[in-house]
Image (spheres, grey):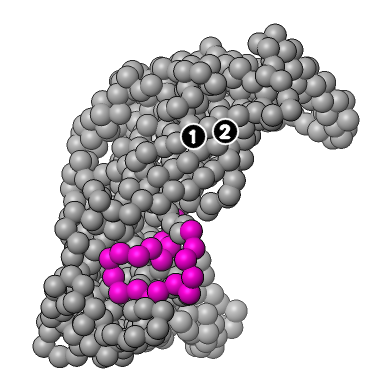
Amino acid sequence: MVRKRRTELPGGGESSESQEAGGEQGSGAQRPPPQQQKQGGGGGVVQRPPPLQQQHGGGRGGGYEGGGRGYAPQPQYGSRGGYGEVRSLASTSSQTAEPTPQQVAQQIEQISLQQEASSSQVVQLAPASSKWVRFPLRPGKGSLGIRCVVKANHFFAQLPDKDLHQYDVSITPEVASRGVNRAVMEQLVRLYQESHLGKRLPAYDGRKSLYTAGPLPFVTKEFRITLVDEDDGPGGARRERDFKVVIKLAARADLHHLGMFLQGRQADAPQEALQVLDIVLRELPTTRYFPVGRSFYAPIFGRRQTLGDGLESWRGFYKSIRPTQMGLSLNNDMCSTAFIEPLPVIEFVTQLLNRNVSARPLSDADRVEIKKALRGVKVEVTHRGNMRRKYRISGLTSQTARELTFPVDERGTMKSVVEYFWETYGFAIQHIQWPCLQVGNQQRPNYLPMEFCKIVEGQRYSKSLKKEQITALQRVTCQRPSETEKDILQTVRQNAYADDLYAKEFGIKISEKLASVEARILPAPRKMVNGGTVKSWICINFSSDVRDSVARGFCTELAQMCQISGMEFNIDPVLPATSARPDQVERVLKARFHEAMTELQPPGKELDLLIVILPDNNGSLYGM
């Protein structure tokens, strides 16, 4: 089976999701507002990846390439925000008459003609150098080796025969959360799909673009949506937010050029068309799983293993539409990454510090480590029954729960957090010597005792992992090709593209069988007649885990094994093996090189071999 293993490791530049965690009244101790204001807030959010921006592989002459992946914010599992009721109003300008279907068709045709005219002008005004560019032809297909057929983790896709349209979407007021944007559009489609949207099921990228398999019955239209957030459960205070949504025709996505490229009659892959197909196929998985970049994770994929320090590995899958020599295909692969375990915060801190936290008070170093690990993590309160309001941690208080006080009314009456929770909820705080979690904004913070908070499931860990955790995560991804094939096929069956409403709407059909690809088993390389020669060599150890005696022993055994294998290998190095810190690599390499050049005779002789022992967790040295 031909495939690439994908392992997502944190710290690779992925951004975090943004969540409005306004200072709602409710779960924790809270400073009263100076005056009553309409409260904002954000429900749970589901992140969607940014539109595809990098170049795809898969030219006519080349083999298939596994694509790179984008990175994105922290996802949340499950529903897209927990919005209950929706009250909305669709309207156009009061002074503008509703266009007839004939007028809409004429306007769409005019836009298409303008695009064709502008594109032809661009071709005519192109620089002379671009007209005469000729791509080098493939020298031919290889013939060496034994021919065979292998299975690849690609699933052939049928190019849809649809008239795709792109619409610009403007949501006011603007919010940074893709989840809120999706909730707005989700409810808009639910209310107006059968009427104003002409029974179309659009695909939305979470930002500014909407795609449909055919024109909508308008060129531009304004909708008004009211979201009612019932995140607190039955009986909770509900927050209403009004949004204005404007949908405007922007362009038509041309699938003809993609078909020409797949037939080898066009040099460049039309990225816009591929992007639309990717967005369509991501719609349904985004609602079912935890999206991270171009991958999707969920506990149902199994192999959920503890990594230590309150982290665990989750399995998932990666997918992307790719143009190949054999046509359009869906690249599907398995992957793993680290998530924060959904533990009570007290238990998470115990694992993080790796000791009995109740034995002695937290030190300043402990507080710094806890704050670093929990900042930005979403938690839910447990002291209010079914009303599990969620908050995002912004920091830790400098005072303990027993010492921390705040005003409880406009007269400035002060109470401690311990007193407040006892009088308001009837709970006695056990860890009174611990700091509280601070949530909400700085102007109106909430204070939550750690023992009444639990980490919300489905939050990817984006910080750097320890080397032991990296090793454990890599071990999870190691499996036999037959096992990987089984997992990939099971993932495709679970996605059920034949029943995907969005795939049906856009006419995309995905095969459930692995693609068969012609391959060749190359003959083994010929054995060298004579062994190589290494007369001058040195060794530098940058790993603190490898003792000097172990490094010297390794070098001696390496020299002996090379001699046994037929090489002429000097058993003694030019300089004794030495150790150095990883942050001094450049200086040490230069110094040892000059020392070796001084020792070598005659002058001008070069080193044959430099052995460098690297630390396990310092990838930066690979670029030296």
3D distance between C-alphas at marks 1 and 2: 8 Å
Whether residue 435 is situated above or below residue 147 in the rendered picture? below
Q: Is residue 2 left or right of residue 263?
A: left
Residue 281, position as x, y percentages in the image: 43, 29
Q: How many marks?
A: 2
Residue 423 against residue 493 in the figure, above or below? below
User: Toward which corner of the image does residue 285 lie, by quadrant?
Assistant: top left
The magenta segment is 16-38
Residue contact at pointers 1 and 2, CB within 8 angstroms:
yes
Residue 15 or 244: which is nearer the viewer? 244
Position of the N terminus by quadrant: top left
What's the mark number on residue 88? 1
Q: 342 or 298: which is nearer to us?
A: 342
* The label number, if any, that marks residue 223 in the structure image: 2
- Judged from the image, the secondary structure of the residue bearing numbered disc 2 is strand
Which residue sits at x=56%, y=29%? 90
Along the line of sight, the residue nearer the viewer: 606 or 370:
370
> Looking at numbered disc 1 in the image, what kind of residue is underneath it?
Ser
